[in-house]
Structures are given as structure tokens and as C-alpha cells.
Amino acid sequence: MELKELKQKFATVFGNECEDVFFAPGRVNLIGEHTDYNGGNVFPCAIDRGTFALVKRRSDNKLRMYSENFANLGVMEFTLDNLVNDKSHDWANYPKGMIKFFIEEGHKIDKGFDVLFYGNIPNGAGLSSSASIEVLTGTVLKHLFGLSIDPVQIALLGQKTENKFIGVNCGIMDQFAVAMGKKDNAILLDCNTLKYAYVPVVLKDELIVISNTNKRRGLADSKYNERRGECEQALKELQTKLNIKALGELSIEEFEANKDLIKDPVRLKRAKHAVYENQRTLKAQKELSAGNLEAFGKLMNQSHESLRDDYEVTGKELDTLVELAWAQAGVVGSRMTGAGFGGCTVSIVKKDKVDDFVKNVGAAYKDKIGYEADFYVVQVSEGARKL
């Protein structure tokens, strides 16, 4: 939907003109998967799809929220003194949780507002629609109430909303990338220390294509906990000799010299992925800073192979999409992104080959899997902001 249509919609829903418009992007992780809880780095960037918020201040303490994506649910209404998770409020619990934690942090929010949300991130595709609406709400509050809060703090309150209000045990990567995104840059982020560096991703003749398997990620949660446990066990075995707190602290050489301490071949593979994938994020920083996009593409491909063979979190749908991508002309690199077992792949494709890529990969995927994949062409974009 165009902004003009959204403004008309706001007027229809709330009977008023909106005052301000805000935007928060979605994100995609370019490399560094299943590294965050192993003490390693991730490498996300903000994308130019995301969530819009059209806002008008109120003089009372009432909050009225409407989402064009869930139009059938109508307007959600509640007050500043009743910010509790209510199942019937569905998606509106995300912004509600943000408001609650802003107030708990001591930020003065003494009036309500009307807000219309609209997102062009597909729900459940693993591009962080929830982090987008959380950080967006934080950005709205900051501007509406003149609060002194920086984007990193907004990201942390977004994570807190997800963990404590919604009840999803997510890390900080999504909210951080949404809040701190920068055009033509990815973020090398250590999720444990929040140390970060911007890394140029200059795509002159290329675009990022996100391909959605359209497979629901049924296994992801149980397998995620299993992988986490396997890595923790491998770390304990390495700690019998090495003074380390996380697998991400190891260089490849140190890991190879000490891997015999890990007694189980499956745990060995899991730990290998965590160590090697973290090193790939550091190599990615080096290659992209030097403008070596082709070398970065090779790292993406290696990342997928490791996630497939050593971490075993890909599955038939993701492997099919990636292998089809590798066979296409103009593909710099392609890999699964996100937790795995469904969700999306991310590919860097030459602009003049994108149409062929979507057509060819789409047809072959449907042929092999039996249903269609969806494709989103995106660019590396700015973080949350007032428009």
C-alpha cells in the first residue's frame, strides 16, 4: 500500500488526520547462523521492507491500535493503566509490551495515541516482523514524548518485550539490526557484549533476493534446544583443558588442535560449525571492507554447507532452494538464513539476472517440492526512523 492510501485509511478508521509517520525495517542475517548463543558474531542488515506507523496524539490515556495486516481484528483499545498481555489483542501485545516497559524504565508517557500499523514483511517468513513492530513502537514513543533514549536501548526493550511480555526466548540480533541498520552496511555484532561494527555492503550491480520456502518451521524450536545442548556439552568437554567461556572464542587452529576432547562425533560436528561459522563472520568483514563481494559470496555458500552437514538444520526445502540458486547465472552466493527447518534463504544476485533467477528457481522448486516459494527483492536499508 502507498502512504497516501494509508493516510486515507487512518482517517477512515480513526476519524482524524494522522500527525506523524514512522518506519522500521525488517532484517536479514547475511552470515553467522546459530553463532549468537555460542558466543560468536552475527552479520545482519536492515532491509527496505518493514512496518509503517501512522500516529496521532490523544488528550486522554486511551490507546487505539489498528493493523491493516489484520484488518479483520478491527481496532484494539486499551488504556495506559492496563498494559497486560491479552490473548484477544493478538498482534497488539507487541506494541503494548513496549509501552509497558518504557514506563517501567521511568520514561514519562502520560497520554495515549491512535496508531495505524502496516507491514510489508511477510509474517512468519523469518524477516523479523515482530522485532520491526517493537522497535517501531519504541521509535514512536521516543518522538511523541521527547524521550532521551538511544536506539540500542530501544532494541533491548524490544528484546525484553519479546522475552518477558510475549514469552518468546529470542536473542538481541533482530531488534538490534532493526534499530541500528544503516544503508549499504551490514552490522558485525557480538550478541553477548553488544560490540558492533558497520561493514560496507556496496551492491552496485547486485540485489538481495530472499526466497521463502513457505514451509512452516515446525521443528525449529525443539531442534534449536537440542543443538544448544549439544554445543554446551562440547564446550564443557573443551573446558577440561581450555580456559574459554564460549565456542566463539576459539580460532580454527585452536579448535582443530583440541577437538579430540569432544568424545561424541555429533557434538564434534556441532562445535565445528559454531567455531568455523564465527570465523566466517570475521572473514566476511575483511572481504567486504576490501570490496571483495565474490569472496563474500563463497563464504555464504560455505555457511550453508556447514549448516546442512555439520549443524543439520536445513532440510529438503532450504537445500533445494539453495542448490537451485547455486546453479543459476549471476548468483554471487546463497545460503539459508534464520533458525532453519523452513523459513528463508538469502541470495546475492546480479541485477540483470534477478528476473531469470525468480522464474527458474521458482519453477524448479515447485516441480521438486510440490508447492510454490515466494521471492522478495530487497536492498540494504536504514534502521527505524521518523519519515
Image (cartoon, grey):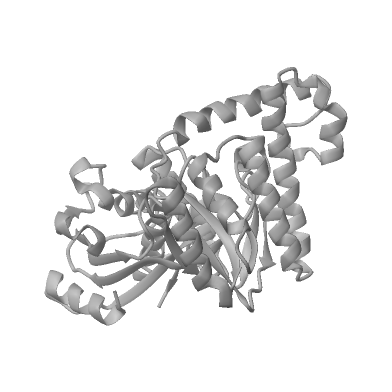
Q: Is residue 366 visible?
A: yes
Q: Is residue 123 above or below residue 243?
A: below
Residue shown at 33% from the left, 75% from the top: 21
Task: State the count of labels.
Answer: 0
Q: Residue at x 36, y 60 (%)?
A: 137
The residue closer to the viewer here, 273 or 359, is: 359
The percent coordinates of residue 85 (x first, y second) are 26, 42
Residue 192 at x, y = what percent? 63, 43
Q: Which quadrant holds residue 234?
A: top right
Of residue 269 and residue 110, the one placed in the foreground of this image is 269
Between 161 and 267, which is closer to the camera in this rendering?
267
Question: If the image is split into quadrants, where does the N terminus sit?
Answer: bottom left
Q: Is residue 190 above or below residue 119?
A: above
Q: Is residue 111 visible?
A: no
The residue positioned 81% from the left and 27% from the top of the image is: 259
Farthest residue in the front direction? 367
In this rendering, is residue 171 above or below 265?
Answer: below
The quadrant in which residue 255 appears is top right
Which quarter of the rendered picture does the C terminus lie within? bottom left
Q: Position of residue 28 (x, y in %)?
A: 53, 58
Q: Is residue 189 above or below residue 55?
A: above
- Residue 172 lies, in percent from the top left, at 53, 48
Taking depth in this image into account, of 266 and 98 the one nearest to the observer is: 266
